[in-house]
Image: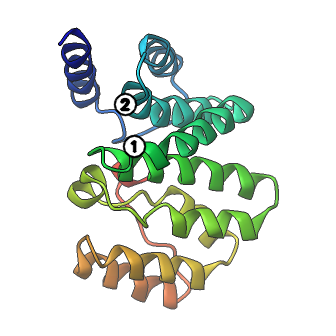
Amino acid sequence: MRRLLIHLLMAGLVILTGCGKGDSGPDPARLQQALERLNAAVTPQERLSCLGEAAKQSLAAGKSAEAQKYAQELLDLLPGLRAQAGAGDAAMDAHQVLGRIALRAGQVDEARRHLLESVKIPGPRMTDYGPEMGLAKDLLGKGERQTVLDYFSICEKFWDRNRLAEWAQQVQQGQVPDFPPNLLN
């Protein structure tokens, strides 16, 4: 019962602090908060809800090794927790972080793979607010239009088809869409 209460309180913190939404630029306070939540997580389910934010905030702070460690741990946890409500969003967070790290290291094929894997298990945050577009935008900057169009096609199965169609048209014309800030984590 106590663990359930802790998990519910932590989930409430995620909602109140806006974890996973909005600007994710370097913010030492957000990184510290994410790491404190992660350190307090005891069960695999609690870690599942904390690792994504720790990975994203570490990456935003320029701590790629730590970000990679958290994202990989998240992917390692997923097979046993796929039935959890946040599993799809956790997979998105992990793959988006790992893809951005790969792209920064010049591993474009790996970044493309992570982009497409990031939306294979739709989660509640993804279906309500939309899939993250940060890695897609980064890949467009490298000329990877077809991969991003493939990403949009997968996303059409669970999110706003009209918006995705508009963005797809822009990408086909060689433009980079003006993605809303809440999708650029």
Mark 2 or mark 1, which is nearer the start of the sequence? 2
> Is residue 185 visible to the viewer in this orientation of the structure?
no
Q: Is residue 139 above or below residue 104?
A: below
Residue 81, label in figure = 1
Left or right of 115 on screen, residue 47: left
| Res. 70 image quadrant | top right
Residue at x-position 46% and y-position 33%: 53
Local SS, label 2 = helix
| Res. 19 image quadrant | top left
Q: Is residue 35 above or below residue 159?
A: above
> Is residue 154 visible to the viewer in this orientation of the structure?
yes
Disc 2 residue type (three-letter): Gln
What residue is shown with label 2? Answer: 45
Q: Pick the residue in front: 3 or 132.
A: 3
- Residue 81 drawn at (x, y percent): 39, 43
Residue 25, label in figure = none
- Marks 1 and 2, how far apart in space? 7 Å
Residue at x-position 26% and y-position 71%: 158
Of the 4 image quadrants, the one containing the N terminus is top left
Left or right of 156 on screen, residue 1: left
Badge 1 vs badge 2, beta-carbon distance below 8 Å: yes
- Residue 85 drawn at (x, y percent): 26, 45
- For label 2, the crowd category at 10 Å Cα-Cα, with few meaning under 14, some 14 to 19 and many 20 or more, is some
Q: Pick the residue in front: 157 or 152.
A: 157
Disc 1 residue type (three-letter): Leu
Count every numbered label the image shows and give the total.
2
